[in-house]
Amino acid sequence: MYQIGEFSKITNITIKTLRYYDEQGIFVPSFRGENGYRYYDEGDFKTAQLIMLLRNLDFGIAEIKDVLANYDDEDDLSYFLTAKKSMIEQRVNIDKALIKKIEGFIEPNIIIHKPEYKIGIVDIKSQRVASIRFKGAYQDTSKYLGKIFSELKGHALGVPFNCYYDNGYCEIADIEVCVPTNKFVNRDGIETRELPGGKGISTMHKGSYDFFNYAYKAVLDYAKNNHLKHELPTREIYHKGPGQLFMGNPNKYLTEIVVPYSV
């Protein structure tokens, strides 16, 4: 048996870290004396070696705890390492995309052009839609849209759009994915209903969604300057956007924003 100081020396794990691992239930010593002293055995030494390996491979505390809770023998290690490798590859791809975006901003004499928008007042016609309303992330809308299109089977009568029922940006948003249709569908979370009309402030955004916020700013500035009270839900109508399988050319995306208003 090794006292904590001795064990620290042979494992290259500080006493402070060993105490922390014990307190957090990550790595508990095999024996604790009546005086509360920690004692470690040969099995603990093997566990410590595994912990050091995982730390050197950039496993975080939560990941190490998860591995130790599910680790029975060396055969298990390859599964955890394969999962970690996949996570790193995903992170690398995200970082590569970010690098490419940064490079676009550090070109000599680059100028960020604020998009210009034409604002108009439109009559929002009532229309029948097949829709799914959910609370979740904005990027989740595509899977619900695919579900609606699969159910309609060619009975869509216009371009899809989303209704947003929150006043601001939300990590968990209240969203309704809508497709105009003449077909009645009421199953698997899809509802066919009549979406009411009204008056709206409208503008078109051409291109990717990187500067989409400028379109909203233009609409809300118009409402303030003309003493109009903007209402909910706002609509994003996707006249041309990414497909179900391929993203297409983002420079050709065409999205209409319609914000209902009252005087």
Image (cartoon, rainbow, N blue to C red):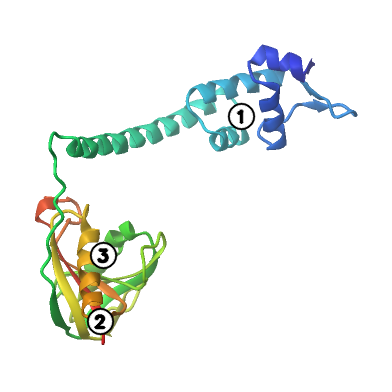
- Label at residue 72: 1
Task: Tell me the CA gap for discs 2 and 3.
Answer: 32 Å
Looking at the picture, how far across and down is residue 90, in whole percent? 34, 37
Task: Tell me the CA gap for discs 3 and 1.
Answer: 44 Å
Task: Tell me the CA gap for discs 1 and 2.
Answer: 66 Å
Marks 3/1 in contact by CB < 8 Å: the verdict is no
Give the quarter of the figure containing the N terminus: top right
**Amino acid at the residue labelled 2:** Leu
Mark 2 falls on what kind of element? loop
Looking at the picture, how far across and down is residue 135, in whole percent? 40, 66
**Amino acid at the residue labelled 1:** Asp
Look at 54% across and 35% down and name the residue there.
63
* Residue closer to the observer: 7 or 259: 259
- Estimate how packed mark 1 is, as few (under 14), some (14 to 19) or many (20 or more) residues with alpha carbons within 10 Å: few
* Residue closer to the observer: 243 or 78: 243
Look at 75% across and 14% down and name the residue there.
6
The image quarter containing residue 111 is top left
Closer mark to the observer between disc 2 and disc 3 = 2
The image quarter containing residue 12 is top right
Mark 2, residue position = 228
> Quick check: 223 left or right of 67?
left
Look at 25% across and 38% down and name the residue there.
97
Closer mark to the observer between disc 1 and disc 2 = 2
Mark 3, residue position = 145
> Quick check: 23 left or right of 217?
right
N-term-proximal mark, 3 vs 1: 1
N-term-proximal mark, 2 vs 3: 3
**Amino acid at the residue labelled 3:** Leu
Rendered position, 66 above or below 73: below
Give the quarter of the figure containing the C terminus: bottom left
Mark 1 falls on what kind of element? loop
